[in-house]
Image (cartoon, rainbow, N blue to C red):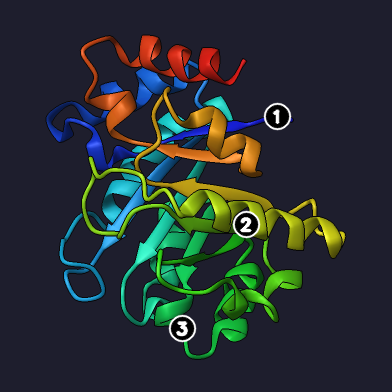
Amino acid sequence: MNVKIAPSILSADFAHLGDQVQQAITARADYIHVDVMDGHFVPNMTVGPLIVAALKPYTQPAGVLLDVHLMIEKPERLIPDFVRAGADSLTVHVETCPNLHRTVEYIKELGLRAGVTLNPATPLGTLEDILPYVDMILIMSVNPGFGGQEYIPASTTKIAHLRRILDERGLENIELEVDGGIHPNNVAEVVRAGATVLVVGSAIFNGQASIAANIAALRSALE
């Protein structure tokens, strides 16, 4: 299985953001993950389209996907702004989209990959009808809002259950992304459960070693 690494800039040093993203890209990151928070849906505020636009000159020449996770209320209002900023993939929350199918179709009509995500307490059943229309499902393995949290152990069962659903329905093409508390000591467990994209923040940007060494440690743990 080709497992992809998506460094989350939530844990990066924003005073040196461009340099740190370039280091991650040089170390063979597959995606750059951007967490957008509004202080309403989650108890934190982060970045917007301007940061996505600023990162595009780093990611585009390298063929690295800008993976934008909208942890915001009424995300459909800002979707065009993130499209113009250069996002390659937009992920929205089941919990914030009463017209989820319409929102997913809107993202795809604008030419981007569309993802849907669940908070830890949201059951997988909320995904049943949307699965055929998405490119990615993101399982939150921490409660969203802040970096550096501990992985919720029950997430492994949830990931494995979703993997079985995707395989049984012939939807193996959908990427299964996991975000929260992933590090070298648990990364193999998460992948064995069925994850194909790993969002990693603190274990890449906040470690004592270099960004390249931290990414290499994750890949080594997968082997």
Position of the C terminus, as image quadrant, is top right
Q: Is residue 177 above or below residue 213?
A: below
Question: Label 3 amino acid?
Answer: Cys
Q: Are marks 1 and 3 in contact (CB under 8 Å)?
A: no
- Image-based side of 217 in relation to 205, left or right: right
At horizontal 26% and vertical 74% (from top left) the residue drawn is 41
Q: Which residue is mark 2?
A: 136
Q: Tell me which label, 2 or 3, sits earlier in the chain.
A: 3
Identify the element where label 3 is drawn.
loop
CA gap, disc 2 to disc 3? Answer: 16 Å
Q: Which residue is mark 1?
A: 2
Question: Label 2 amino acid?
Answer: Met
Q: Is residue 121 above or below residue 84?
A: below
Note whether residue 30 is visible.
no
Question: Label 1 amino acid?
Answer: Asn
Q: Tell me which label, 1 or 2, sits earlier in the chain.
A: 1
Q: Which residue is mark 3?
A: 97
Q: Are marks 2 and 3 in contact (CB under 8 Å)?
A: no
Residue 208 horizontal/vertical position (percent): 21, 13
At horizontal 70% and vertical 70% (from top left) the residue drawn is 131
Identify the element where label 1 is drawn.
loop
